[in-house]
């Protein structure tokens, strides 16, 4: 039986020290496991979208198994489509991994111009996400809530194809909707701060898959995302929230100079898809914790030795980053990833991830 070197810190102590810019004993491990964890516990992969208690319990137990960072998040499921009146589809089929938009809330230009901010507290996934945060608070996890990139959230309200088309043909309308998304995300943050009264305990999550250069250009990112994302993050920070977790998903190398202009926190946590080299990430975010970024497909279908080697490469690059590094996958781990492959990531930390 493999025996790991004795830790000098608990994972909670290690994570807290990292956010205080203090030395730690080794690289932390974050299993990106919202869908993977329920499968590990014998639930369906989508249980977290219908039962916050079971979803959170699965994540806690999976983190215990793999010695993972005490951080969890609820993505909301195509959030905020249902909050604005759209419809989504839960991933029940064998190959589906995430909640998909089935019907957007807005289908015409006239409806887009009339769209108003809804009462968020009882709509869509908000109550489920709030219950998830109550469990985080109860068990000593940082309180997370889904914030999000402007264009990703807008894509779930009107549909990504329509959004891209309107960027070209109706830019003034897209700007109007981007500001509405700003107001919505700020209202979500205010709701969480008003509820828990401890913004210093909060680490909101922003996922940004729709910002990928596989979907939009860097010029469009600079016009339709950058100023609005800055506004949301600054207002969140002004509420007393110290750290924001931002997942820069997919191929976004051309967007990195713009992301680097956005105030992530002190420090922020910034994770990346496998398309972004960690040396490049370190260059653009020297004052933030970086995280990543093993390709999820390799974790699911690759040999254990391939996962171990990619982990070694990530660790050796990430350890050089001045503000700290967390080993993780480059996005949510596929739910049916072999547990042994995930264990090989943790083994690589023991073999290569020590600072002392």
Image (spheres, rainbow, N blue to C red):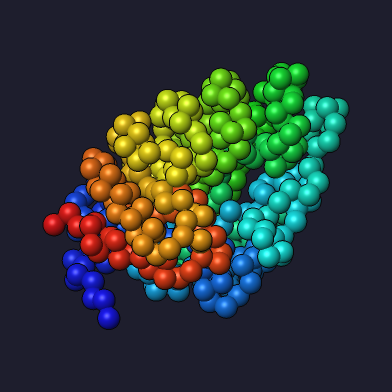
Position above or below: 3 against 301: below
Report the label total: 0
Residue 208: x and y in percent read 55, 40
Which residue is more in the foreground, 94 or 132?
94
- Where, by quadrant of the figure, is residue 181 drawn? top right
Q: Residue at x 65, y 29 (%)?
A: 178
- Quarter of the image where the N terminus is located: bottom left
User: x, y (%) of residue 344?
Assistant: 36, 65
Q: Is residue 328 visible?
A: yes
Left or right: residue 106 versus residue 336 is: right
Q: Which residue is found at the position 23% from the left and 62% from the top? A: 351
Give residue 209's position: percent from left, percent from top. Answer: 57, 41
Name of the residue lying farthest toward the left: 356
Residue displayed at 38% across by 68% down: 343
In the rendered structure, the answer to whether residue 302 lies left or right of residue 51 reads left
277 vs 332, nearest the viewer: 277
Q: Nearer the viewer, residue 179 or 74?
A: 74
Q: Quadrant of the C terminus?
A: bottom left
Camera sees residue 29: no
Q: Residue at the location (19% across, 51% down)?
A: 23
Q: Position of residue 213 (x, y in %)?
A: 56, 31
Q: Quadrant of residue 108?
A: top right
């Amino acid at each position: 039986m493999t025996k790991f070197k004795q830790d000098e810190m608990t994972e909670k102590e290690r994570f807290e020290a990292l956010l205080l810019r203090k030395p730690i004993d080794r690289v932390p491990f974050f299993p990106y496991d919202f869908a993977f964890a329920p499968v590990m516990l014998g639930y369906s992969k989508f249980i977290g979208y219908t039962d916050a208690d079971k979803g959170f319990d699965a994540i806690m137990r999976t983190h215990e198994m793999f010695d993972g960072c005490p951080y969890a998040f609820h993505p909301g499921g195509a959030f905020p489509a249902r909050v604005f009146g759209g419809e989504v589809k839960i991933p029940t089929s064998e190959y589906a991994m995430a909640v998909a938009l089935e019907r957007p809330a807005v289908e015409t230009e006239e409806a887009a111009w009339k769209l108003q901010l809804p009462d968020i507290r009882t709509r869509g996934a908000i109550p489920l996400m709030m219950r998830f945060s109550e469990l985080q608070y109860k068990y000593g996890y940082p309180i997370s809530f889904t914030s999000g990139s402007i264009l990703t959230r807008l894509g779930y309200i009107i549909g990504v194809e329509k959004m891209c088309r309107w960027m070209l043909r109706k830019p003034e309308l897209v700007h109007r909707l981007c500001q509405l998304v700003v107001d919505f995300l700020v209202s979500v943050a205010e709701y969480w701060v008003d509820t828990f009264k401890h913004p210093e305990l909060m680490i909101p999550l922003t996922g940004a898959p729709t910002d990928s250069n596989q979907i939009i250009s860097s010029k469009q990112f600079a016009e339709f995302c950058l100023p609005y994302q800055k506004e949301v993050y600054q207002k969140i920070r002004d509420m007393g929230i110290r750290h924001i977790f931002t997942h820069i998903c997919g191929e976004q190398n051309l967007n990195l100079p713009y992301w680097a202009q956005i105030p992530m926190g002190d420090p922020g946590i910034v994770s990346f898809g496998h398309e972004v080299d960690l040396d490049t990430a370190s260059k653009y975010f020297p004052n933030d914790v970086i995280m990543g970024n093993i390709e999820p497909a390799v974790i699911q279908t690759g040999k254990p030795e391939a996962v171990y080697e990619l982990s070694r490469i990530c660790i050796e690059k990430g350890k050089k980053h001045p503000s700290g590094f967390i080993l993780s996958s480059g996005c949510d781990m596929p739910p049916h990833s072999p547990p042994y492959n995930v264990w090989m990531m943790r083994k690589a930390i023991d073999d290569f991830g020590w600072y002392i």
